[in-house]
Image (tube, grey):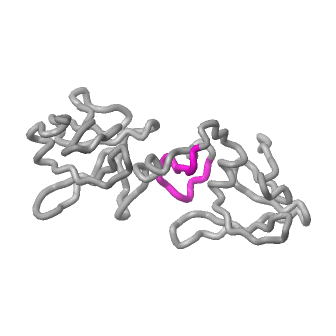
Amino acid sequence: MSEYQILPIPGFERYTINEDGEVFDTKDNKQIIQTLDKDGYYRIKLVDQNNKRFNKYVHRLLAETFIPNPLNLPEVDHILAIKTDNRLTNLRWVSRSDNQKNKNGYNDLFEFVDTLPEDADEVEFYTGHQLQNYYYSPSLNKMYFNNGVRIRIMIPRYCRKSLIYLCLDRFNKHIQIYLTRLQKGLYNNE
């Protein structure tokens, strides 16, 4: 049986956390109960040294305690987009933009691939918007997003009788990419 690394929680030294996200109060050596919030994240209640109460996300506490953040990135991303999977291997520090790009939307279960198709072309520009890490495969007629860890097959939506992909540009602005424009090669034209 392997031993877990157990460390004090920064800012809440009265508590310790292990690599599985189990939090203990060192005052009485009891495990703190986690609750699942309405958004699907595990949370716990902690008290700081001034007796002020805080609701904290378990994934955030894990990252602050165990995952280095040399770039001082503001958000913690669940790489697999499963909010209840708080394994350290599923967490990483990211920008707000990258976190938004990796979230599940509309209750979708995304499909992932290990590699991009050979003919996948990076979509860097679309109607005046700069994009990053989006790809289109003409042979498969599919769009992909690479979050740096895995490649997600994008899911098109219907908008005014047309299929579109909902994407974020480099400035975190929502844009709609029409499948018909991709099929006609109407992208990457600044």
Query: Percent from the top left, x then y, of residue 82?
Result: 50, 55
> What main secondary structure does the magenta stretch of the protein show?
loop
Query: Percent from the top left, x then y, of residue 182?
Result: 15, 42
The residue sitting at 34% across, 53% down in the picture is 173
Query: Percent from the top left, x then y, of residue 174?
Result: 31, 55
The N terminus, quarter of image: top right
The residue sitting at 79% across, 71% down in the picture is 52
Q: Which residues are magenta?
A: 73-87
Find out whether residue 84 is within the magenta segment.
yes
Residue placed most toward the observer, 187 or 81: 187
Q: Residue furthest right?
A: 27
Find out whether residue 103 is within the magenta segment.
no
- Decide if residue 80 is on the left or right side of residue 31: left
- Decide if residue 16 is on the left or right side of residue 176: right
Query: Percent from the top left, x then y, of residue 43?
Result: 65, 65
The residue sitting at 80% across, 47% down in the picture is 6
Residue placed most toward the observer, 175 or 119: 175
Placement of 132 over or under 42, stated as above or below: above
The residue sitting at 64% across, 40% down in the picture is 69
The C terminus, quarter of image: top left
Counting every numbered tag in the picture gives: 0
Residue placed most toward the observer, 1 or 173: 173
Q: Residue furthest top?
A: 118
